Structure formats: C-alpha cells, structure tokens
Image (spheres, helix red, strand yellow):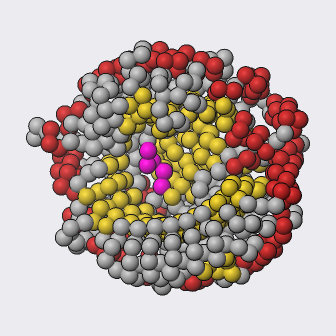
Amino acid sequence: MARFLLVTLCLATLEARTWTDTSGREVEGEWVSSDARSITLRLESGKTVTFPLAKLSDEDQSYATKVAAANRHPAGWKPLRVRMEYMEETPRAVGMPGAFHRLDAYTWEADLPPGAWIRVDTSAGAFGGGSHLLQWKGAPEWHFDTEGVFLYRSKGGTSARELVGVSVGSGGGSSALDSEQREKFHKLVAEVGPVESVSSVMLSQIDPVRPLLAKLDPLAVTVQVDHRSDFSKLAGLRRMKAVYFNVGQLQSFDTLGELSSIECLDAGNAFTSTLDDSGVLAKMSRLKFLETGMRSSSSFAGFSRMKGLEAMSVRCSTPASLESLVGLSRLHSIDGFSVPPALVRRLPGLVRVGSRIDSQKDDGSPLVMEKVSFLRFASVEQVVAWKQAGGLPFLHEIEYLNGDLGELEGMSSLRHVGISCYGETSQSGHGGATRLRTLRVKGNAMHARKVWEAQEQLYGLGIEVWTEESSLPGLAGVDGLRWLELSKLPKLKSLKGIGDLGELSYLAIEKMDALTDVSDLSALTGMEALRLEGLPVVEKLSFRGLSSLKDLRLRGLVKLTGVDQVSVARALRRSNINGCPAMVDWDDWGGLASLEDFYLVGRSSETDLASLLKLDSLRQVDLISVKIPDKQRLEANELTGSALLERVEAALR
C-alpha cells in the first residue's frame, strides 16, 4: 500500500485522507483540485499528480465532487501558495490589494488569474533586500529564498530552485562596498545573464549600471525614483514588461509613455494628477495590471484606451468619467475608489471588488454578481441583498464587513473574513461560515467569539481595538492557530492563556499601553517568528522555552532592559531591534551560533557588540544611529561587505 503525506492546500479540510481506486489500492493524501473528469493530489515530494476521477471508488468520487463544490473558483482562477524566507517578507498581487492571506509565519495564499504579476517584497537588507515583480503562470506553489543579492524560486517539494532576481544599486549591497568592491560586484553579477527581475535600480544614477542591466535583460525592474525622474532611461530594456517604483509625489508620469511595451505598472504610493491628461495612457495600450494613486479631481476618461486592462487599484476617492471603464471587457478587479451600483452592473466580469459600492446612488434594480470572489467595505445588509439577487456562489473573502456575520446564512464558501464589531451588535452565530481560514476582528472581540469557536480549522486570527477586557478572550477553541495578531488592546495586562496555542508559529503584539507581563510566551515552544512593537511598559523579556525561534522583531519597547536566557534561542537567524534604548547587555548574544542578520537602530549610549561580531554565522550587521566604538563599526562594515561578495561568488560557482 503506497502512502503519501501531502502538504495542505485544500480549503475545506486539513486532514490527510485515504483514497481508494477501483482496484482497491489505497493512497493517503489531500485534495488539491478536481472537476467532472479528473482529480489532482499532492505527493510527499511536493509534486502534484492528476489522473481520471473515474479511477476512484464511488465514495471518493462523491467526496471529491463535494469538496470541489465548496472550493469553486471563477473560470481560469487558481490558488497560489507562496512561502517566504522571513516573517516581514510579503507577496502582493499588483492591482489586487489584499489578495494574499497569511497562513503561518512564512506562508501566504491567494486566488489569482494566471498571468497575474506578483510583487515579492524581500527584507534581506544589503544582501539583496528589495522588491521584485514576477509573473505567475499557474504553478500551485512558489518558495523563495535569497543568497547574496540573488533571489531564488522553487515550485515546492523537490523542485530545483531557479535564479529569478538580482538586486543592484544602493539597495543591492553597494552601500556596504567601497569603490573597488563595487566594481568587482558589478562584474560578478554581470555573469548571471538574463533574469526575470532586477531590483533597487536608482533611476537618477542609472548610467553606471546601464551595461549591467543590458546583460541581465530583465522582464521587470524595480526603480528608486524622485519626483522628477525620467523613465525614458529604461526604454532600452527590450524584454521589460513590468515596472515598480514607490514615491510620495510625482510631478508627472509623462516619460512613462516611453515604456509602451509594459503590461504591469506598480506605482506604489505615487500620486499624480497627470496620469490621464498627459497622453501616457494612449501610449501604454498593452497595460494589464495597474496600481497607483490619483488626485480626487482626476478623470478616468483615458482608461477607455487600455482595452487589455485586467486589474486596477487606483486610490482616488471621487474620480470623474467612470463610464470609460464599461468598455474594458477583460477587467476583473477594481480597487481604491467608490463606484455606483449602476457601474458594477455593467462590468459583468468582475471577480474582485475592492471598491466601495455606494448604495446611496442605487436605483433599486437587482445587483447580480455571479463571479465575485472578493468584497471590501460591505455591510451585512448589502451582502444579504446581493446574495439574494445573484447568489455570490464564489464569494471567498470579505474585508471590512460591517455588521453581524451570523446573519449571513448559508455562506459556506467564505474562507477569509474581516469584521468590524461596534455598537450593540452581538455575533449571534457564524452564518454557516464554518470553514474560515483567517478571521480579523476590529472592535469588541467577544462579539465575534462564536464565529472563531465554530471553525473547523482556523489558520489565523487578528484582534484589533478591543477595549473592554484586561485579559485575552477565550482561545481554547482555536488551539490549532498558526498565527495570532493582537493590536490596540489598551487594557490587556498579561498574555495568560496564550500557551494553549500549541501550534502557533507567528505572534505579533503591538500598541498595548498596559501590557506588562509577557512571561507566558515561554509556553510557545514551536513559535518561529515573534514581533513585539509599541509596548511601552514591558521591562522583561525571556527566551525561555523559545528554542524554535528563528525571526525576532522588537520595536518601541522603551523600558526593556534586556533579554534573559538568550542562548535558548539557538535557532535564531535574524534579529531586528529598533527603539529599545534601555537594552544594555549584549554579551550573551555572542552565543547565538545560527544568527546571520542583526539590525540595531537607535542607541544613544555606548554599545558594546564585540561578542556578537565574533559569530562565524554572522553575514550582515546594520547599525543605524548607534553609538559604538569605531573599531567595532569598521568590523561590522567589513563583515557585511566581504560577506556580500563571498555570497555572490559562491552563488556563481
């Protein structure tokens, strides 16, 4: 009897199941997908195998059909699971904010159309940290890791990893290099040849790296810009299809018109009033995925020329000429601006509606959303009305749901929900949503307690602005949680009860003015990632019990004097400490034999890192506004620069 232990991807169940074929042979595994003719399972190696559904027993065929019905996707859309290397690294679908949901410390999932562009934000600092744009073509899994300035991707299981991205410029390590090292660095990287993405290109200083870019010949480029940047400097990159930049204010997008071949533009937080008026859109007729911001007075008239546009996230509260979107037959995702129901009725291909649907402008006719999988800024009353009109058969996600989830009877397809619980609302039930994977509650958490207690398997729970209680809400019913985020609980004094979460891999606690006792963290022996921010009265922290901890971020713990039993965290690879001025003793950190990256920000008093800098494992030290002996600062800079070149050379061998 063959047996395979499969990595979980099924939305309906997490338990391995024994499948039997028509000849009586058995295999243990998990469902990935199925239709009327075939079924796909995942093998122990990570590979997915597809075979005729008819080869299974009648019972298993019936089970597969039921699971498929509960996990339906709009035509062509598929699930993608992404595993990152560190807790602060995130994937993001351009034009589709909120598409990815965290499953544990390092794993994310999203439902996407093949061809979508994914922005992978890595946080490896001078060792290649930056953002890379990569196009997804339907693989069920992506795993990412970095070596030096290189970004590697594998497709899960035993799949060989492939080099997909390189970071150059100030964000790619040159800040730690002298001029001679930088020249050597560029020569080494040039040996790589064509890649999918190049990150951290300073557009204002592109000339020295232009020959390098020509050799790398990327599909996508991440650029650092200022408000007067000239994008025509990128026009010579013949394969380029995508650009990402992030700046607060651009005077003009005019020179973007020189990049007529791109199909993905991620403008981050950029805002401009000239995107539509300058004729740029007329030149960018191949654009499919767009993320940017526009002033409220801007017009959408020029969007009518972008016939291939599929997803747009444009932060603009009251744009004019919304009618120009009606002719965009491939548009499946809108986000960032309010829309009247009349417009939604004329966009039948919508799958993701992140825009607020303004019910005050409704003419009263039925609003049918047969393909919609994602809604944002909706009230329970709206969802009930839309469900009655069109069924919402594919609805998997709701963000900022306002009201009582218990009123959404029969919503068994829901997987990810964010609820606002204010006023006298009480969560009387779960509305049939018993298969949620993540739940975020904003407001009085006790109002949503029945929701999380009813779940068959909840991966993650977020609680924010819970003002009534001084202790944690009951978590015994969700002991299988993989991640927990607690924010703005002003009366919470201790973490008593958190030890019940034996499978927790990621914990984030922030903005807790009354929290003093964090000793219960020691019970989380399997926790891999811990983030503590804005805890002004916490004085003591211990690594007791945290032998699995790999990833640590401390920020704004102004009274924290130090960390006890540091040596217990022998698996710790990365430490990021910012705004903890009372920490004075770093000697014990020299015993962390796995520590590779160490970040320290904001130390006005003399800091002695001699013990830590002797670690053989250390590859990067970032010290910002830290008072440290000159000799140690030189050691840190030399270590970072030399290690960078060593990693680049090793990766090329």
**In magenta segment, residue 98:** yes
Percent x, y of residue 475: 42, 79
Q: Is residue 195 left or right of residue 302?
A: right
- Judge whether 284 appears above or below 356 on screen: above
Percent x, y of residue 454: 35, 74
The answer to which image quadrant residue 472 occupies is bottom left
Residue occupying the far front of the picture: 605
Percent x, y of residue 500: 50, 83
Looking at the image, can residue 234 be seen?
yes
- Judge whether 299 appears above or below 499 on screen: above
Q: Nearer the viewer, residue 271 or 367?
A: 271
> The N terminus appears in which quarter of the rendering?
bottom right
- What residue is at 26 percent from the left and 51 percent from the top? 378
> The C terminus appears in which quarter of the rendering?
top right
- Judge whether 162 appears above or below 65 on screen: above
Q: Is residue 116 left or right of residue 398?
A: right
Most common secondary structure along the magenta stretch: loop
Q: Which residues are magenta?
A: 97-101
**In magenta segment, residue 587:** no
- What residue is at 38 percent from the left and 31 percent from the top? 294
Looking at the image, can residue 409 be seen?
no
Percent x, y of residue 287: 47, 24
Q: Is residue 538 left or right of residue 195?
A: left
- Judge whether 136 appears above or below 300 on screen: below
Q: Nearer the viewer, residue 500 or 169?
A: 169
- What residue is at 43 percent from the left and 41 percent from the top? 96
Q: Nearer the viewer, residue 142 or 214?
A: 214
